[in-house]
Amino acid sequence: MDALLTLFDYVGVFVFAISGALAAVRKGMDLFGIVVLALMPAVGGGTLRDLVLGQPVFWIEGTRYIYIALLGAGVTFLFAHYIEGGQGKRLKWLTWADAVGLALFCVVGAEKALDVTGSSLVATMMGVVTGVAGGMLRDVLCVEIPLVMKKGEVYATAAFIGAGTFCLMRYVGAPGVVTVWTAMAGAFIARAGGILWNWTLPKALH
C-alpha cells in the first residue's frame, strides 16, 4: 500500500500543479507566475499538514516533489495554448484537475496523519487540510473566492468523505489497496457530483 500511496502523492502533486498553472494562464500571468501558482496547490496543503503535525516538510525531505510540480507547470505553459475553447475550456480542465488532486491528497494526508497520531479524527481533519489548503492559496493569489468558500460547492465535504472513508476502513481492518481506492473514489465522486449535478449539503430550515 505504501507504494500506491506514494504514486498517488506524485500524481496529486502533478495534477494540482496543472490546476494552479491553468489558473495562472487564465489570469494572463507570465512563466514565473505560472510556476508560483503551480506550486501553491501542489505543495501548500501538504506543507501545512506537516507543520501542524510537527513532521519534516515532505518536499524538503524529497525535492522530487518540486520537480514534479515544475514539470506540471512546464507542460501547462507549453500546451495551454492548444486547449481549444479558450477560457471556458481552461476552466473545465482546471476544475477537473483540481477534483483529481483533491481526491488523491485527502487520502494521502489522512494516511500520513493517522500513522503519526493514531487518531482517526485528527487524520480526517488533516486529510481535509491536505486536500483543500493548497487550492485556497491558489485562488487567493488569483484574487478569487476560494472554491471551498463558495456557496453550494461540494469541496471540503468531498475531502472529508475521502479522508473519513479511509480512516473508517482502516479502523475495521479492510485491505489496504481496497481502502485507498475506495476512499479516493468516494472523494472524487462527491466532487464530481457537485460539478456535474450541483450536489449540495442540506440547509437548516428557518
Image (tube, rainbow, N blue to C red):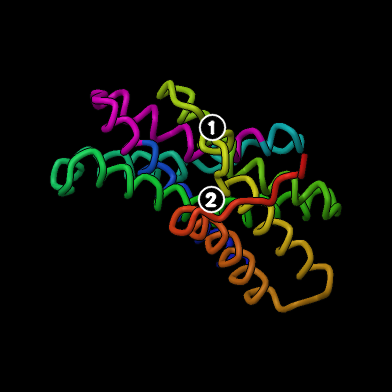
Q: Residue drawn 45% across and 47% down? A: 98
Residue type highlighted by circle 1: Met
Residue type highlighted by circle 2: Leu
Q: Residue drawn 25% across and 47% down? A: 89
Position of the N terminus, as image quadrant, is: bottom right
Prevailing secondary structure class for the magenta stretch in the rendered image: helix
Identify the mark at residue 136; answer none if there is no mark.
1
In the image, residue 191 sits, relative to residue 186, either above or below, namely above
Q: Provide the residue designation for mark 2.
A: 102
Judge from the rendering whether residue 157 lies leftward or rightward of residue 59; answer left or right.
right
Q: Earlier in the sequence, mark 2 or mark 1?
A: 2
Judge from the rendering whether residue 56 lies leftward or rightward of residue 199; answer left or right.
right
Q: Residue drawn 24% across and 25% down? A: 28
Can I make out residue 60 in this image? no
Secondary element under disc 1, as helix, strand or loop, is helix
In the image, residue 100 sits, relative to residue 48, either above or below, namely below
Q: Nearer the viewer, residue 142 or 9?
A: 142
Q: Residues within 10 Å of mark 1 (few under 14, many from 20)?
A: many
Q: Which stretch appears magenta? A: 21-48
- Asked whether disc 2 touches disc 1, contact meaning CB atoms under 8 Å apart, the reply is no
Q: Nearer the viewer, residue 192 or 183?
A: 192
Q: Residues within 10 Å of mark 2 (few under 14, many from 20)?
A: many
